[in-house]
Image (tube, rainbow, N blue to C red):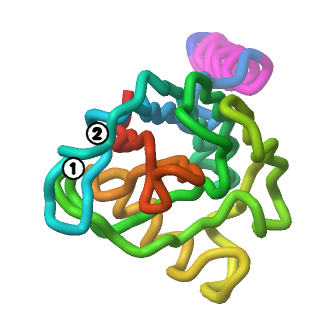
Amino acid sequence: MQKRAWTLATALCVGMTVACGSDKSTGPANITYVANLAASNEVLANGSSAGVVSTGTGTWTGVLNPTTNVLTWTMTFSGLTTNSTLSHIHAQAPTTTTASVVLNFATFAGSTITLGGTSGTASGSINLATQAATPPSLTISGDSLLKAINAGQAYVNVHTSQYGAGEIRGQIVKQ
C-alpha cells in the first residue's frame, strides 16, 4: 500500500510541475539601453567638446530581446541649432574619443528616421545574430556591436548642417 501511495504522490508532483510550468521557460528578461544626447557629450576630432554650442537634446532607448537577439530602438531629439543631416551609432570608442559609424539610421533598411529639421525621431530594429557585416546594415558584426554596447564603447549622435561632425551625442549605457 505504501508503494502505491508513493507512486501516486510522485505522479501528482510530476503532473503539477508539467501543468504549472516554470518561470524559466519564458527565457531571459529583455535588456534596456539608454543614451542621453547633449552637446556637452560631443567630442571633436581633437578630443575636446569645446566649440559645440547647442541647447539640443535627445534620448535613444534600445531594448534587446536576448532570446531572439533583436535590438529595437527609438530616438527623439530637439532644439538643434540648424537642421539635422545624419544620425547613427558609432562603436569602439569610450566617451572621450570618436569612432566609425557602424549603423546609419538613414540608410539602414530596418529603421525609419525624420531628419532635416531641428527636431526629429528615429526607430528601428535589427537582428544582431543574422545581420551581415556589410553596409548599409552594419559595418561590424551584430555580435561585435553588442559587445561594444555592453562595454560602454558605443554612442549615438546627431549631425547638423552647422556641426557636421555632430551636434549632440550620448554614450549607450545598460540600465
Decide which of tag 1 and tag 2 comes sooner along the chain.
Answer: 2
Label 1 and label 2: CA atoms lie apart by 8 Å
Residue type at mark 2?
Asn
Residue 129: image x %, image y %? 63, 70
**Which sits in the foreground, 23 or 69?**
69
Which residue matches tag 1? Answer: 95
* Residue depicted at x 57% and y 12%: 2
Q: How crowded is the residue under tag 2: few (<14 C-alpha within 10 Å), some, or many (20+)? A: many
Residue 100: in magenta span: no
On the image, the x and y values in percent for residue 84 come to 65, 46
Answer above or below: position of 175 versus 155: above
Q: Which residue is mark 2?
A: 41
User: What is the x, y in percent for residue 35?
Assistant: 43, 34
Q: Quadrant of the C terminus?
A: top left
Residue stretch in magenta: 3-19
| Total marks placed | 2
Residue 36 vs residue 144, the one in the foreground:
36
**x 38%, y 39%: residue:** 170
Q: Which of 120 and 124 lies nearest the eye of the viewer?
A: 120
Residue depicted at x 39% and y 66%? 91
Query: In the image, is 170 to the left or to the right of 13?
Result: left
- As shown in the figure, which amino acid type bears the numbered disc 1? Thr
CB contact under 8 Å: marks 1 and 2: yes
Tell me if residue 17 comes above or below residue 142 in the rendering.
Answer: above
Res. 29 in view: no
Q: Is residue 13 left or right of residue 117?
A: left
Locate the N terminus and report the quarter of the image it occupies: top right
Magenta residues: mostly which secondary structure?
Answer: helix
- Secondary structure category for the residue under label 1: loop
Q: Is residue 8 visible?
A: yes
**Front residue of this view, candidates 156 and 175:** 156
Looking at the image, residue 147 lies above or below residue 41: below
